[in-house]
């Protein structure tokens, strides 16, 4: 190695990139306010060039299905928006007939409502498992206490059972239950999303009258699913 190159190598400053990245600040709040939230309402924009950008071409008339990539786009956008903001989907297009617009409204609402039902079902299933686990934990604890005076009964099995049940209860209380509630709220918000169409992109602007109308529509939808 040349002497000059060696000198440069050893005189270079040591840089702590890890600490630099740890000090990096998030600007998600300003991004949300800039791109999504206006007067308390979160608007998700979606530009399409054809009917099949939303309705998969593999479905048949009367049994339409939403394109999976489109659903993933909605979920990804809605996840970063705080729960207290209602969702509006603004589809920017100049290629749809009125019949196609109504079909898109129906298929999006139907598929998101179906997804909400599946999330509710999974939450209920996990809740039942949690209750059974609590019962198992109590029984294992009782057996563990009783076997303390039984010389011929190995207590290791009941100890392992007690630890297993306790781990399941801990996991649900501090992790799984919270995640399921978040997933259910997100699915419920998406199932209640308001869909509008526009010819060109315009920044959202909602006055008090718009907010009252939106709240009334959401309340009616939730009362009459």
Image (cartoon, helix red, strand yellow):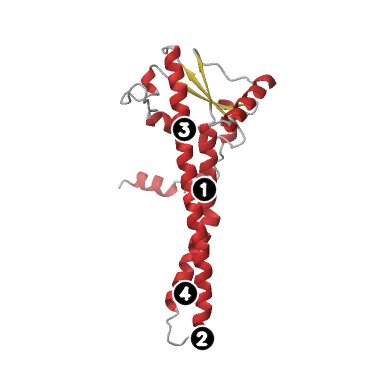
Which residue lies under the disc numbered 3?
Answer: 112
Residue drawn where x is 47% and y is 39% of the image: 117
In whole angstroms, how far apart are the C-alphas of marks 2 and 4?
A: 14 Å
Q: Earlier in the sequence, mark 2 or mark 4?
A: 2
Disc nearer the start of the sequence (4/3): 3
- Percent across and percent down for residue 125 are 47, 51
* Residue plotted at (58% across, 36% down): 82
Q: Which residue is mark 4?
A: 159
- Compare marks 1 and 3 and give the one earlier in the sequence: 3
How far is the residue under mark 2 from the one under mark 1? Answer: 42 Å
Dot 1 lies on which element?
A: helix
Label 1 belongs to which residue?
A: 179
What is the CA distance from the residue labelled 2 to the residue labelled 3? 57 Å
Q: CA distance from mark 4 to mark 1?
A: 29 Å
Tell me which numbered mark, 4 or 1, is placed earlier along the sequence. 4
Label drawn at residue 153:
none
Q: Which badge, 2 or 1, comes first in the chain's sequence?
A: 2
From this view, report whether residue 45 is shown above or below residue 174: above
Whole-percent x, y for residue 119 in the image: 47, 42
Of all residues, the one furthest to the right in this rendering is 208
């Amino acid at each position: 190695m040349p002497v000059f190159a060696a000198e440069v190598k050893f005189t270079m400053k040591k840089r702590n990139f890890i600490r630099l990245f740890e000090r990096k600040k998030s600007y998600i709040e300003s991004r949300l306010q800039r791109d999504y939230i206006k007067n308390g309402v979160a608007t998700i924009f979606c530009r399409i060039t054809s009917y099949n950008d939303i309705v998969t071409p593999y479905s048949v008339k009367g049994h339409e299905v939403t394109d999976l990539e489109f659903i993933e786009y909605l979920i990804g956008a809605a996840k970063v928006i705080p729960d207290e903001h209602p969702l509006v989907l603004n589809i920017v297009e100049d290629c749809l007939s009125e019949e196609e617009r109504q079909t898109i409204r129906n298929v999006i609402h139907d598929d998101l409502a179906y997804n909400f039902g599946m999330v509710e079902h999974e939450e209920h299933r996990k809740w039942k498992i949690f209750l059974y686990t609590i019962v198992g934990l109590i029984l294992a604890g009782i057996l563990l206490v009783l076997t303390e005076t039984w010389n011929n009964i190995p207590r290791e099995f009941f100890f392992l059972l007690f630890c297993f049940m306790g781990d399941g209860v801990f996991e649900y209380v501090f992790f799984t239950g919270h995640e399921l509630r978040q997933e259910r709220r997100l699915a419920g918000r998406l199932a209640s999303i308001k869909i509008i169409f526009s010819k060109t992109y315009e920044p959202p602007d909602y006055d008090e009258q718009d907010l009252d109308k939106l709240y009334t529509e959401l309340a009616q939808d939730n009362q009459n699913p």
